[in-house]
Image (cartoon, grey):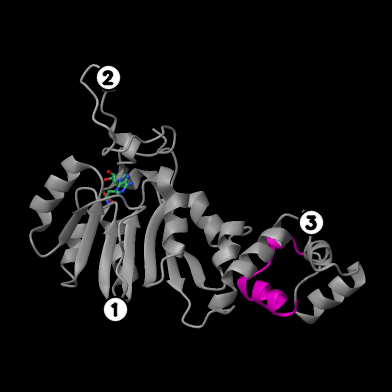
Amino acid sequence: MPRSRHRPRHPNARARTDRERPPQRTHDLGQNDLVDTAVVRDVVAAIIDRRGAIVELAAGTGRITVPLARLGRPLTAVELDPRRISALRRRVGASVTVRHDDLLTTPLPRSPHVMVANLPFHLTTAALRRLLSEPAWTRAALIVQWEVARRRAGIGGASLLTVSWWPWFDFAVHRRIPSTAFRPRPAVDAALLVIDRRSIPLVPHKERVQFQRWAAAIFAVPGDAVTATARVERLTRRRARERCVRLEIDPSRPVSRITAHQWARLWEAR
Ligand SMILES: C[S@@+](CC[C@H](N)C(=O)[O-])C[C@H]1O[C@@H](n2cnc3c(N)ncnc32)[C@H](O)[C@@H]1O
């Protein structure tokens, strides 16, 4: 069953009478658990050399939480489904902080930490937006749909969401995860997407809002780097081409194929 087909019902929503209550559908919450232990090991390995506390979102019944707990670091596991919370508490014991909360709003630490999540697919974009605007985590190891991971990492062309955050984050696909690694099995493969906060941003933080507006304007122009630069910067095509060549950007390159460093150079050259 595709994970994203049904709109999820929030378990904390107004209580309904039995007659009103629809049949329980666990896939509404994207409960595709990770049953492949080799993939679990890869998720843990992705954060093992990053210091700080660990926050796991969408912890489920603890298939990733348990091996994370063995690292002996402060660990908070967040899960929305109250039935899963009870199972999780029994499984991990008192050393893990188990929090019954929504991953989109749960408070995150203000000190450096790492994030882990096998995200419910229907919340992927909302969760990414939320995480990217949080100030303190240094690395996030996230399981997301395969195609989403490729787009976020700029493979075969970056999306505006990626470009908007590229000066401050690096996105990499660590591995593909076959749909057979989950129960119930989703309709599509997934990937382990690892996002690192850049220690030296490519664009100063204080310019983020302006950069994002400008990038959106460039993205809205169909075509290549020259066409977009000329339109947004109000340059002649000749001047725009000269600027691209000077900045080592192929003038005929589609906007979605411009790299993170090239975006930063274009921004600086405005
Ligand atoms: C794909 S499962 C992952 C479970 C477990 N981490 C694993 O890998 O086996 C997603 C989990 O997120 C939970 N979930 C769904 N919506 C959530 C939300 N808004 N906040 C927190 N957890 C949520 C689901 O109940 C489910 O347990």
Q: Nearer the viewer, mark 2 or mark 3?
A: 2
Secondary structure of residue under mark 2: loop
User: As shown in the figure, which amino acid type bears the numbered disc 2?
Assistant: Glu
User: Residue 113's quadrant in the figure?
Assistant: bottom left
Residue with the mark numbered 3:
223
Residue found farthest to the top: 19
Question: What whole-number distance in Å separates the C-alpha atoms at marks 2 and 3?
Answer: 51 Å
Mark carried by residue 20: 2
Percent x, y for residue 214?
A: 69, 65
Name the residue nearer the viewer: 151 or 213.
213
Is 216 positioned to the left or the right of 270 in the image?
left
Residue at image location 34% in from the left, 41% down from the top: 30
Q: Earlier in the sequence, mark 2 or mark 1?
A: 2
Q: Magenta part of the protein: which range? A: 253-270
Secondary structure at badge 3 equals loop
The residue beneath circle 1 is: 51
The crowding category of the residue bearing disc 1, from other C-alpha atoms within 10 Å (few below 14, some 14 to 19, many at least 20), is: few
Mark 2 Cα-neighbour bin, 10 Å: few <14, some 14–19, many ≥20: few
Q: Predominant secondary structure in magenta?
A: helix
Nearest the eye: 249 or 20: 20
Between discs 2 and 3, the one toward the N terminus: 2
Few, some or many C-alpha atoms within 10 Å of disc 3 (few <14, some 14-19, many ≥20)?
Answer: some
Tell whether 248 sits left or right of 90.
right
